Amino acid sequence: MPFMKRFRSDGIGRKGGEWTRRSAILGAGALASCNNPAAVAQRGASHSLWPVSGPPVLRGAVIAQRRRRIEVDGPTFGGGGPVLPAYRRPDFDALASMGANLVVMSFPEFWTASKPWKRDAQMADVLGQQLDDAKAAGLYVVLAMRSGPGRSDFIFHREAQDTWFPARLIDDSIWRDADAQAAWSAMCEDAAKLVQSRSEIAGLNIMVEPEPNVGGLNREGGRLGAWQAEDYAAQVSWISDWKRIAGDVARKVRAAASDLPILISPPSFGRTEFLSVMGAPPVAGTVWCVHDYEPRAFTHQSEAAAGHAVFSEGAANTFESRIDQAKTGNVPVFLGEFGASRSAAGVNDYYAARIAACEARGIGWAAFRWPTQDAGYEQADDMFNVTIGGPDARPAMDTLRPAWARNAQRPDGIRLRGRT
């Protein structure tokens, strides 16, 4: 069954504490004008893993998981555990052996998605094991909260509702429910307390791809659906305003963990253009985390359409221009996800262009998606697998591996000369 088929509304873009497992277990103009005050608000020296200038320190890959539902997945598909796919020590060792020094864990339901909202002991145990394994492999970790109170994993797969899963499993009530928002904040605070002293933790992303446009409300009480940054800023209601919600979450996390880098993405699935609506960082130690999957006709083409789209962007709407608008002043920026279908002709040119732009601007990056060694699962979900090529494309690894060779730092102060 498809798992990581990435959802985005058709409307987008058309208009212009120590842890043991037992204890745990825009318009461009608007964007530029709104980022300058953000740069002034962030004070103090930048975190060593998130420099504002000079070469990036963190280069790696993303893993994304969801909570097993027996009615959808059966008991064994994807590894047989409470999350799928299951990532184990050899998977993290393989990533580190390629030169990566970072894994972004897009992790599901550390707290339950439905009431009563509370920490899920099984999921906490899985997370503890994965953190242990990543650290043993020599990888830093960004823990990214994918789902939880009022937000189920299936919001990322809306276009497939009532095919391989029933639509009733979609829960996006967080954008209309203040109690769910408070529970989400408590979940992030809980996670921060548990991971803050672990040497491999590079930061906590308080929500993966926040998206109030679909489940949120406008100021008249209707569906928000504002796919341009200026429209969003003018129309979003108080209850659905991610800037307010993110600020509340970040302040709780900062009170619980004084030195933990806090990654915050803009709304509209973390799109760079929407960073303009976020204003100044709500707390010191903020890292803006953006995702980029443009041009979408290229990055998301199916195998049946392999070779039909060529990697290109218009002169007025390039990744470089988007990222330059985001990187202003002394607020670190992280390209937390980017990737393209393995079937896309010229996929290596896409990765090379994205990486070159980040390297030139001192921006850390993580490619989507690092696979498991579960052949059955990877056969069912291979669209973004960076280790295999397509009919007209070489594997993205041909570009990623020499880029990862620039890494010189590992957890616990281990420094490397670089890998070839």
Image (cartoon, rainbow, N blue to C red):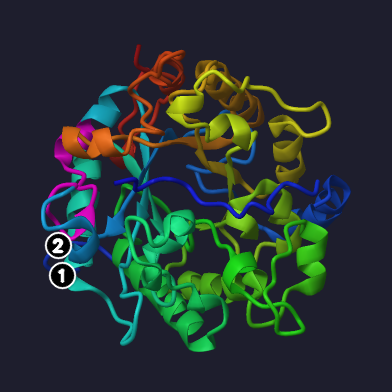
> Which quarter of the figure has residue 233?
bottom right
Q: Which residues are magenta?
A: 78-93
Whether residue 333 can be seen here: yes
Q: Between residue 26 and residue 16, name the one nearer to us.
A: 16
Give the residue at x 63% y 19%: 310
Q: Give residue 23's mark.
A: 1
Q: Between residue 33 and residue 392, name the one nearer to us.
A: 392
Could you tell me which secondary element the residue under label 1 belongs to? loop
Q: Are marks 2 and 1 in contact (CB under 8 Å)?
A: yes
Could you tell me which secondary element the residue under label 2 belongs to? loop
Give the residue at x 80% y 52%: 26
Residue 330's x, y, as percent? 69, 47
Q: Is residue 85 magenta?
A: yes
Q: Residues within 10 Å of mark 1 (few under 14, many from 20)?
A: few
Question: Three-letter amino acid code at disc 2?
Answer: Arg
Give the residue at mark 2. Answer: 21
Question: Three-letter amino acid code at disc 1?
Answer: Ser
Give the residue at x 77% y 84%: 220
Give the residue at x 34% y 16%: 419
Where 62 falls versus 222 (above or below)? above
Q: Is residue 7 magenta?
A: no
Residue 73's x, y, as percent? 21, 56
